[in-house]
Image: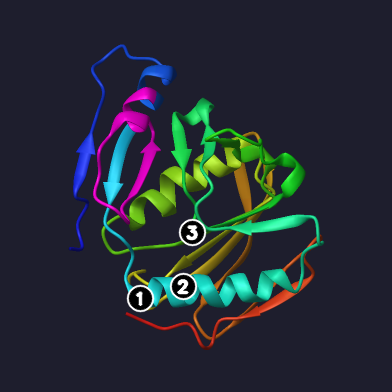
């Protein structure tokens, strides 16, 4: 299955709490990713293996670059209420002290880095809505790995969020090295990333 399985929009006039309640009460197949993107609850099928392999390669490198009291999470629910968003990044780096215990959500502003690997069915969300959402929340760095870009796979690193917008720190293609600045000080080799 490659297309979005379900897309439900709450009735007009509902507020953020109602949308979150709808998200919490949804009954979806196991392995599916359920997010709120610009006020719309979306359900996407589990990612394909190439997607998972890319995320795992990045995660492995991040562990070598982060402090011991930070975590690299794959299924952390991060909220951006100002953009009516609740995202589940493919990877997100957050100091463990910023992850509320016993809660379902972590404010996106707590993230040092959000990583999204596009899927064919929902790439536009990662390229547009989440780009704006992470910037609005003040996430320091956003790494967008886009195997489904027109032409050839690309990788973009965004940073220095200000007034809800990012500055492009790197724009390149698979096979190029991407340098993540402080606090990571990490060069990520993208040569081994699988292509669709």
Q: In whole angstroms, how far apart are the C-alphas of marks 1 and 3? A: 13 Å
Q: Which mark sits nearer the N-terminus, 1 or 3?
A: 1
Is label 1 in contact with label 3 (beta carbons under 8 Å)? no
Q: Is residue 34 above or below residue 30?
A: above
Where residue 61 sits in the image (x, y, percent)? 66, 76
Residue 94 in magenta?
no
Please report the residue visible at 41 percent of the width from the left and 76 percent of the height from the top. 153
The residue identified by callout 3 is 90
Q: Which residues are magenta?
A: 21-39
Q: Secondary structure at mark 2?
A: strand
Q: Secondary structure at mark 1?
A: helix
Q: Quadrant of the N terminus?
A: bottom left
Q: How is the image coloured?
A: rainbow
Where residue 126 sits in the image (x, y, percent)? 42, 53
The residue identified by callout 1 is 49
Where residue 3 sits in the image (x, y, percent)? 19, 57
Q: Quadrant of the C terminus?
A: bottom left
Please report the residue visible at 43 percent of the width from the left and 18 percent of the height from the top. 17
Q: Residue furthest front?
A: 102
The residue identified by callout 2 is 154
Q: Quadrant of residue 40?
A: top left
Please report the residue visible at 22 percent of the width from the left and 51 percent of the height from the top. 4
Q: Residues within 10 Å of mark 2 (few under 14, many from 20)?
A: some
Compare residues 72 and 139 and report the one nearer the observer.
72
Q: Residues within 10 Å of mark 3 (few under 14, many from 20)?
A: many
Q: Which mark sits nearer the N-terminus, 2 or 3?
A: 3
Q: Quadrant of residue 163?
A: top right
Q: In whole angstroms, how far apart are the C-alphas of marks 2 and 3? A: 16 Å
């Amino acid at each position: 299955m490659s297309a979005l399985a379900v897309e439900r929009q709450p009735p007009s006039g509902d507020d953020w709490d109602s949308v979150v309640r709808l998200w919490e009460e949804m009954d979806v197949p196991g392995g599916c990713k359920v997010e709120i993107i610009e006020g719309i609850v979306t359900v996407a099928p589990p990612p394909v293996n190439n997607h998972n392999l890319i995320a795992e390669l990045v995660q492995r490198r991040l562990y070598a670059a982060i402090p011991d009291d930070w975590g690299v999470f794959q299924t952390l629910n991060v909220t951006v209420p100002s953009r009516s968003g609740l995202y589940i990044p493919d990877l997100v780096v957050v100091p463990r002290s910023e992850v509320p215990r016993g809660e379902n959500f972590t404010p996106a502003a707590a993230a040092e880095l959000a990583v999204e690997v596009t899927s064919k069915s929902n790439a536009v969300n990662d390229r547009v809505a989440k780009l704006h959402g992470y910037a609005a929340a003040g996430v320091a760095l956003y790494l967008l790995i886009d195997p489904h870009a027109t032409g050839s796979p690309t990788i973009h690193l965004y940073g220095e969020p200000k007034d809800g917008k990012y500055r492009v720190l790197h724009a390149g293609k698979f096979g190029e090295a991407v340098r993540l600045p402080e606090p990571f000080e990490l060069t990520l080799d993208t040569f081994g990333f699988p292509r669709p």
